[in-house]
Image (tube, grey):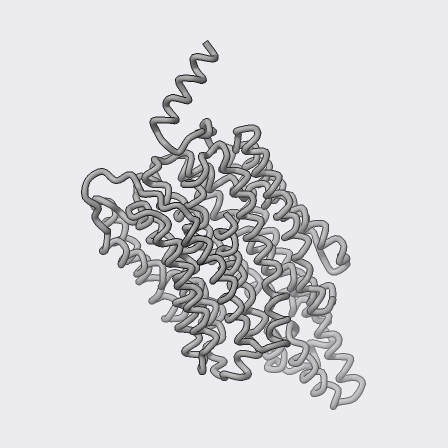
């Protein structure tokens, strides 16, 4: 477990640690047009690798993929650190994402090999805590390394930690052979078609509204290609003897319920974590440092409650109460966030985000455990990776939808908040150039525009202050609507999870031993 959590820690850190170093990386390597590609390549590659790794580990065992993914991730980190251009960095980040996807799939799946479901809750709580902790300390470590030895150490730091994890896992992790009946057959066509639909869909969600308009030919082409490949993928999987993503998993009501709720929670969580810092900095007017640390209380709430929730599941042998209470509390937190406004305090934001984090922590250990307990042991890898896969898809959808809400609501709210006398003295083309919310998020851009207005004297500076106030109102309204949309997402998750069926947690990973335990318990009852 120590080796496993170390490996998961570096993979989790790398999804957040790079963001802090990106401005310095772009300044040295140039190629600003590839800025978003560094993040997108990692996201797409890791998501596409998840279900494939899960299925292959069901066929050939976990240790090969666990050790191999750590080695791959460490090697790709070294290549990222040695990059001499943004194009190279994007390519190597894609390779790093493949290793991270396999590693994340194995981290949760191997727990199913080491612990029976009745004991698994507390262990999943530990893993979720490491996952959450890595997310919050990543930006801080990234800043320290970037300002200290340099941005390349953002990647090189993975080498010593990864080497320790690799040694521990290689020598101490047991090689548990899968129970396979008959000859194994890899679903090559299904794997290819999985990548063929995941990549364009995720690119469309990542680029839409940011790099390209939602109604642009590029987004239409990517979406259309992705949907076509998805249809072909489903037809291939229905006919495959060993599908990479078994369709029968979706026919299991417990599995289908759990993956839908997990995806909705992931989408709702991203609605909070992505826009809470933006609200703090642009609406409340706090510094970038304060907005960056606002998520620390939320994450610590997730860490603490995930540990407690996992222990309670193990002690009580029940997971449904945690699923329902967690989603309900998270819904309350999202609703309270949606009530924040121009007059809200920094303390109120912390209070509401902590409530959302408490709910997230309570529910987090549930869904992997629920699915692993509900499926055949031979499908544990595919089923567990399916949860992580749906969480990634849910996060991408959440970012795309909530980003569109901010973009579409800011302009009308901004123009409505501008006093008539101010709008009357400004040409239409000036207002059109100032209705981009990114202007008000960048201190440098705001100072440059302020200097231009101030050139016309005190009246010009006053007009700029009025526009800033209107932009603050526009951002408050648009972010409020994001939190309100996230609230409805969480209401849907809470309603769906009410139908989650509870079945007894198995006390053994071996079917024969489980059957003996059930007979023994029945005889004791009789």
Q: Residue furthest front?
A: 171
Q: Nearer the viewer, residue 488 or 350?
A: 350
Residue 337 visible at all: no
| x, y percent for residue 495 | 52, 37
Query: In the picture shown, does residue 99 fall above or below 386?
Result: below
Q: Residue furthest top?
A: 526
| x, y percent for residue 300 | 65, 51
| x, y percent for residue 435 | 61, 74
Residue occupying image coordinates x 46% and y 51%:
391
Query: In the picture shown, does residue 27 fall above or below 240?
Result: below
Q: Residue furthest left?
A: 183
Q: Nearer the viewer, residue 60 or 481?
A: 60
Q: Quadrant of residue 85?
A: bottom left
Residue 168 visible at all: yes
Question: How many numbered marks, from 0 up?
Answer: 0
> Looking at the rendering, in which quadrant would you find the C terminus?
top left
Residue occupying image coordinates x 41% and y 22%:
517
Asked whether, in this view, residue 80 is left or right of residue 252, the answer is: right
Query: In the picture shown, does residue 108 fall above or below 402?
Result: above
Q: Quadrant of residue 510?
A: top left
Q: Quadrant of residue 179?
A: top left
Q: Nearer the viewer, residue 188 or 208?
A: 188
Q: Residue furthest right?
A: 458
| x, y percent for residue 509 | 39, 34
Residue occupying image coordinates x 49% and y 55%:
8
């Amino acid at each position: 477990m120590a080796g496993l959590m170390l490996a998961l820690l570096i993979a989790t850190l790398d999804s957040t640690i790079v963001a802090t170093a990106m401005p310095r990386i772009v300044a040295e390597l140039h190629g600003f047009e590839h800025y978003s590609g560094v993040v997108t390549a990692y996201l797409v590659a890791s998501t596409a690798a998840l279900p494939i790794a899960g299925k292959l580990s069901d066929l050939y065992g976990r240790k090969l993929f666990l050790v191999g993914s750590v080695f791959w991730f460490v090697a790709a980190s070294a290549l990222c650190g040695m990059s001499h251009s943004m194009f190279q960095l994007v390519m190597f980040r894609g390779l790093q994402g493949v290793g991270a996807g396999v590693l994340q799939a194995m981290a949760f799946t191997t727990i199913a090999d080491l612990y029976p479901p009745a004991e698994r809750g507390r262990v999943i709580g530990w893993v979720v805590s490491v996952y959450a902790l890595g997310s919050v300390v990543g930006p801080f470590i990234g800043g320290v390394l970037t300002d200290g030895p340099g941005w390349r150490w953002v990647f090189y730091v993975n080498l010593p930690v990864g080497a320790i994890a690799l040694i521990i896992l290689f020598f101490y992790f047991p090689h548990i052979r899968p129970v396979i009946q008959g000859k194994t057959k890899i679903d090559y066509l299904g794997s290819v078609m999985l990548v063929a639909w995941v990549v364009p869909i995720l690119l469309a969600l990542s680029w839409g509204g940011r790099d390209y308009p939602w109604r642009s030919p590029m987004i239409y082409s990517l979406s259309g290609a992705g949907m076509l490949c998805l249809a072909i993928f489903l037809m291939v999987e229905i006919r495959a003897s060993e599908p990479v993503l078994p369709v029968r998993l979706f026919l299991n009501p417990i599995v289908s319920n759990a993956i839908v709720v997990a995806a909705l929670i992931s989408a709702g969580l991203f609605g909070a974590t992505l826009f809470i810092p933006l609200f703090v900095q642009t609406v409340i007017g706090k510094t970038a440092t304060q907005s960056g640390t606002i998520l620390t209380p939320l994450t610590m709430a997730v860490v603490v409650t995930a540990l407690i929730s996992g222990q309670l599941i193990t002690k009580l042998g029940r997971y449904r109460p945690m699923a329902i209470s967690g989603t309900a509390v998270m819904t309350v937190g999202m609703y309270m966030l949606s009530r924040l406004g121009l007059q809200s305090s920094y303390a109120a934001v912390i209070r509401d985000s902590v409530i959302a984090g408490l709910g997230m922590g309570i529910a987090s250990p549930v869904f992997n455990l629920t699915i692993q307990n509900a499926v055949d042991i031979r499908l544990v890898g595919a089923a567990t990776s399916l949860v992580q896969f749906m969480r990634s898809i849910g996060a991408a959808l959440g970012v795309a939808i909530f980003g569109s809400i901010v973009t579409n609501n800011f302009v009308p709210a901004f123009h409505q908040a501008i006093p008539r006398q101010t709008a009357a003295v400004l040409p239409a083309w000036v207002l059109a150039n100032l209705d981009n919310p990114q202007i008000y998020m960048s201190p440098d851009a705001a100072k440059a525009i302020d200097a231009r207005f101030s050139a016309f004297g005190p009246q010009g500076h006053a007009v700029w202050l009025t526009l800033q106030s209107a932009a603050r109102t526009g951002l408050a309204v648009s972010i409020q609507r994001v939190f309100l949309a996230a609230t409805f997402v969480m209401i849907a998750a809470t309603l769906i999870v009410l139908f989650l069926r509870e079945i007894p947690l198995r006390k053994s990973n071996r079917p024969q031993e489980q059957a003996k335990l059930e007979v023994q318990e029945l005889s004791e009852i009789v």
